[in-house]
Amino acid sequence: MLFTKMREEKDDNKYKFIKSDEDNLSSWMKENLYLYYCTLENPDEIEKKLIDQYNPPLNLKDNNNKVNQEYRQN
């Protein structure tokens, strides 16, 4: 899967995929990912552990893995 461009949202200074890439990513996720969930009293605690364990590259918040360092430079 190849993404072409990202754009900066002026309202919240976040970078987002252009529409066509967002659509491609959404299609890929629907075909390739499973979603499991549970309710927790303190989800932030487990979220940080999961991020450390699985290192999701698109999850930049709390992702301190060196592999994703270049994504966090902005």
Image (spheres, rainbow, N blue to C red):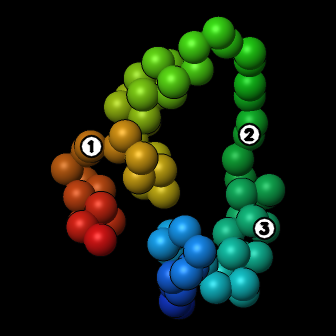
* SS at badge 1: loop
- Disc 2: which residue: 34
Q: In the rendered image, is residue 44 in sight?
A: yes
- Disc 1: which residue: 64
13 in relation to 5, above or below: above
State the CA–CA distance, disc 1 to disc 3: 28 Å
The amino acid on which the numbered mark 2 sits, given as a three-letter code, is Tyr
* SS at badge 2: loop
> How packed is label 2: few (under 14 Cα within 10 Å), some, or many (20 or more)?
few
The amino acid on which the numbered mark 3 sits, given as a three-letter code, is Ser
Q: Which label was assigned to residue 27?
A: 3
Name the residue at 64% across, 85% down: 18
Compared across the picture, whether 12 is left or right of 21 comes to left
State which quadrant residue 65 falls in. top left
Please name which of the two marks, 2 or 1, marks the residue nearer to the observer.
Answer: 1
* SS at badge 3: helix
Name the residue at 47% across, 50% down: 59
Q: Residue furthest front?
A: 11
